Amino acid sequence: MTAKPAAAAARATVYGYPRQGPNRELKKAIEGYWKGRVDAAALRETAAELRRGTWQQLAEAGVHDVPTGDFSYYDHVLDTSVMVGAVPGRHRAAVDADALDGYFAMARGTQDVAPLEMTKWFDTNYHYLVPELGPDTVFTADSAKQVAECAEALALGHTPRPVLVGPVTYLLLAKPAPGVAADFEPLTLLDRLLPVYAEVLADLRAAGAAWVQLDEPALVQDRTPAELNAAARAYRELGGLADRPKLLVASYFGRLGEALTVLAKAPVDGLALDFTESGAGNLDDLAAAGGLPGKRLVAGVVNGRNIWINDYEKSLATLGTLLGLADRVDVSASCSLLHVPLDADAERDIDPQIARWLAFARQKTEEIVVLARGLTGGTDTIAAELAANRADLASRAGAALTRDPAVRARTAAVTDADGRRSQPYTERSAAQRAHLGLPLLPTTTIGSFPQTTELRTARADLRAGRIDEAGYEERIKDEIREVLSFQEKAGLDVLVHGEPERNDMVQYFAEQLTGYLATQHGWVQSYGTRYVRPPVLAGDISRPEPMTVRWTTYAQSLTARPVKGMLTGPVTMLAWSFVRDDQPLGDTARQVALALRDEVNDLEASGTSVIQVDEPALRETLPLRAAEHAAYLEWATESFRLATGGVRPDTQIHTHMCYAEFGDIVQAIDDLDADVISLEAARSHMQVARELAAHGYPREAGPGVYDIHSLRIPSTEEAAALLRKGLEAIPASRLWVNPDCGLKTRGWPETRASLENLVAAAREIRAELPTEAA
């Protein structure tokens, strides 16, 4: 049946786009600038070239208004802090001396000044820099970046739509600045912030922007009446400005709920809503609210966070329903395409049939354009595209890759007993202390050591055939010996082999498990210049053979001290992959957990007494609405216990988490039943230690004392001061000493110095403790 044509031609658009360039040109230019090989002018020209290329590609594909202002050297929330003048006092001198260097100092810190705290952007693996605000914060408008990029696009003949983080989301993401009372609420600064946004909007209108997009994803979370009233006040004031462009308020990552009514009533010109993550929620709520008469609706019907092709017929059905609910309906992805790789056509090593199931940013843009054309002209105008789409969807549904009867039978046979250790923690702890013989405040690292140029070159040489497997393995052995030797000399108590053979903590395992696909160019920004290649979880998961046992046992053969086995947990294997969307996540997590259980058991059988199963994504993947937390945490914690529940009592199970708000999931951390957890704590000044204590967490914990995402080398005194804070919350008998996260992104000189200071701090604090502390 032919869909009814839209009253006005539907336009295609996107909320934002990947920043890095086809070959990660931005990463290379920025890191070159940090190392002094690229000057500021060359860096800016690289950035301008990438923006020009993106806008041209979008325009040629058929996108009507292109996003501007979403490009960033490091992080768009940090850009917003600059735009509103919220520069921390400790960074003001650096910013005043050189805006670009000061910007990077806020992001990365310097040897003398700590950076802004970094944490996860909602339930994604993107990290943002947390604004630091207080009652004395004075906001001042600096619209230079946004105006310049809008003018760039106009000069090239494009229709720009500047994208800003909305004022309510910005304040809800902020935290009290150091020295400010912990109960200070940044949202109380809204009336002080709105005039600054008004000034920026006026500047953008003067620069030629017809529309400005204000992103308010925080409104898809549970919000109090006071917060909803603040949103209503914000958009009543901004919408009532005489000197402003048209305002498009965008939300994504879920259902707006009560906030939809607030925004629908506001005097703004359009809303952009997510119709993928919210299921039917936003559609039902929009209909219940009476639609958006006289306003523009940008319908996010193409999933902006996953890489599977769109179901055109399903999307057109949704779009057809929306036609009667707004003055005009345009088509977009559900959120910025920042969260997916750039171009699936670059993947030459994936089976062509499977490649047709994939849509990266470029392909998603094409899907959006096709849907807009079909919405405008009816399904007859896209008959060929619909037929090809149906065939591709059927090909995926019927592929042998997606279903393995043996895996499904094993998963169905899992019992509650499989997810429980044989003894309670108190009994295990005693057995582990006797077996391992560790001192008070045992020192360790999180797992990875610097990935040097030589290591990356060796991997490239192996792929290119310049060295054989034997030559590569000798290089790996040399690196492990060096890492072990350093740790012993530095005085660390529980060692790691350094993971020199691993390219990424998820990709390395995905390449050895059935059901996963690896990409060659599927880079996605995690933070700053850190890009990852999430594997594609396409089918049922199993482990054909051991993945880590060989290198872990080799490392253990070089030392008498315990060497940790290092694995990535099932939730993180899902969260940092592009996960299949054709079965419940809990089912997929159990499959991964059983594969990891085999690896854990083989590590123990080989003599490994300490095994770390990292779950940094446990908090990140927490649903944005509280009503959905319990169901998620049930399968998430169960999958961890299933992976680790089969070991002896004297085998010590560790886990690790970083860069998230852990206070929301302390009970879940407890439910993991790990013997030791290490967590990020340096930038947040041991906040997580206090949260664990408030919960009554009964096990051992290592809140980090070395911020590895900064180039700073913490002094012995600094690390000792953090440890003393940790001891205020966690007794010495249960406190570990470790960095915040793995060290693969750091260089060897800073790693050596920082870990030596960490060990010295632990020794200093041990000497201060009374003998009965043990």
Image (tube, grey):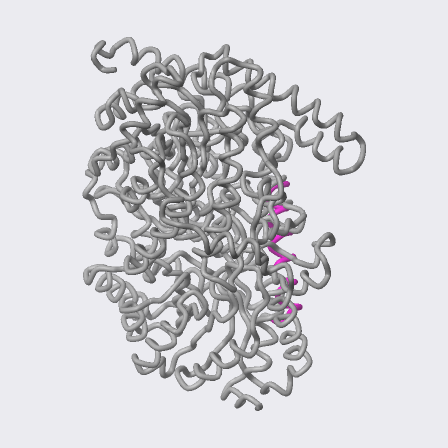
Nearer to us in this view, 514 or 347: 514
Q: Quadrant of the N terminus?
A: bottom right
Q: Which residues are magenta?
A: 41-62
Residue 683, given in percent of the width and then of the height, sits at 35, 33
Residue 207, given in percent of the width and then of the height, sits at 48, 62
Q: Quadrant of the C terminus?
A: top left
648 sits to left or right of 497: left
210 sits to left or right of 773: right
Residue sticking out furthest to the right: 466
Nearer to us in this view, 310 or 718: 310
Tell me the residue at 57%/58% (across/down).
405
Tell me the residue at 41%/27% (across/down).
651
Is residue 561 shown above or below 385?
above
107 sits to left or right of 31: left
Tally of numbered tags: 0
Is residue 60 in the magenta section?
yes
Is residue 172 shown above or below 472?
below
Is residue 427 shown above or below 286?
above
Nearer to us in this view, 20 or 36: 20
Residue 335, given in percent of the width and then of the height, sits at 47, 62
Tell me the residue at 42%/60% (across/down).
203
Nearer to us in this view, 71 or 645: 645
Tell me the residue at 36%/72% (across/down).
281
Judged by its main secondary structure, the magenta piece is: helix
Give residue 699's quadrant in the image: top left
747 sits to left or right of 688: right
Give residue 680's quadrant in the image: top left
Residue 74, given in percent of the width and then of the height, sits at 50, 43
- Residue 682 seen from this side: no
Is residue 724 in the magenta section?
no
